[in-house]
Image (cartoon, grey):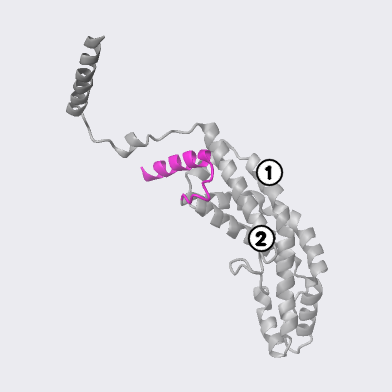
């Protein structure tokens, strides 16, 4: 037993010296080895990230002032009606114009909550090629994918809701009144009093603005965006591939 106790320190010293002789500076990949995710992990992580991002976007925009209080997506008079707004305001009809803008945004907030199932369906239908293209693609690759695959479905889903909401909050009435007042003026090009299609498209545009912001957060490795170990693993792998 004494012989063992004497030999153990000598063995430790020998191992230490041997390690020192063969020491090589550790690279970052040695210290933090890059774990290559499987195709299943890549698919699950991307879908998880997109579900979180689209749900958050829809929730934010469907809240009170989600559109009206957000300068990036706030809906104003249509471009062809901005002259109308200016003319009406010059005639003292500020309240009418303000009501049009507020009601348009309230209608958009009302419709945005219906976006989640459409985005989830698009995510479920993603192919492996779609997943790879988004993961290793441009900063807005996911946003562009959603524009391509959901715009038509969103328009079909949103339009009845927008129409009902415009009626409910008075936008149809306010805008119709504004258009009617403007159309009474001599020598002006008459304005279409129907604003439903415009409000529907602006609601969809606003959603994609928010989704693009959420996508960018994930790609920029913000801790609040890469919120699970799977997201961290897969997107760290994607970062390393882009860096090569």
Picture coordinates of residue 19, whole percent (x, y): 22, 26
Tell me if I can see residue 170 in this picture. yes
Q: Which mark is residue 149?
A: none
Residue 222 drawn in magenta: yes
Q: Which residue lies furthest to the front in this view?
A: 2
Q: Residues within 10 Å of mark 1 (few under 14, many from 20)?
A: few
Residue identifier under label 1: 121
What residue is rendered at 77% in x and 75% in y?
175
Q: What element carries label 1?
A: helix
Q: In this view, does 186 lie above or below 110?
A: below
Quadrant for the N terminus, please.
Answer: top left
Q: Position of residue 181 (x, y in %)?
A: 78, 84
Identify the disc placed on residue 61: 2
Residue 186: x %, y % from top left: 76, 89
Q: Distance between the residues labelled 2 and 1?
A: 20 Å
Q: What range is drawn magenta here?
A: 221-244
Q: Is residue 36 left or right of residue 103?
A: left
Q: Could you say which quadrant of the image residue 6 lies in? A: top left
Are the residues at dot 2 and dot 1 in contact (C-beta closer than 8 Å)? no
- Please identify the quarter of the rendering in which residue 29 is found: top left
Q: Which of 127 and 54 is in front in this view?
A: 54
Lateral position of residue 10 relative to residue 215, left or right: left
The x, y position of residue 52, in whole percent, is 61, 47
- Which secondary structure is most common in the magenta stretch? helix
């Amino acid at each position: 037993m004494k012989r063992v106790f004497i030999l153990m320190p000598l063995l430790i010293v020998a191992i230490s010296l041997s390690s020192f002789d063969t020491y090589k500076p550790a690279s970052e990949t040695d210290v933090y080895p890059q774990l290559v995710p499987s195709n299943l992990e890549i698919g699950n992580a991307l879908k998880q990230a997109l579900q979180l991002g689209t749900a958050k976007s829809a929730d934010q925009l469907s809240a009170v002032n989600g559109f009206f209080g957000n300068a990036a997506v706030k809906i104003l008079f249509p471009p062809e009606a901005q002259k109308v707004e200016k003319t009406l305001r010059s005639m003292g009809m500020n309240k009418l114009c303000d009501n049009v803008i507020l009601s348009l945004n309230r209608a958009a907030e009302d419709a945005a909550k219906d976006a989640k199932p459409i985005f989830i369906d698009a995510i479920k239908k993603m192919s492996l090629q779609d997943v790879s293209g988004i993961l290793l693609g441009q900063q807005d690759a996911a946003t562009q994918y959603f524009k391509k695959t959901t715009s038509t479905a969103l328009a079909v889903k949103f339009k009845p809701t927008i129409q009902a909401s415009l009626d409910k909050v008075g936008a149809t009435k306010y805008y119709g009144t504004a258009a009617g007042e403007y159309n009474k003026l001599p020598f002006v090009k008459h304005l279409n009093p129907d604003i439903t299609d415009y409000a529907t498209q602006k609601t969809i545009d606003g959603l994609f603005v928010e989704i693009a912001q959420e996508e960018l957060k994930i790609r920029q490795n913000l801790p609040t965006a890469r919120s699970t170990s799977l997201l961290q693993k897969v997107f760290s792998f994607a970062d390393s591939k882009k860096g090569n």
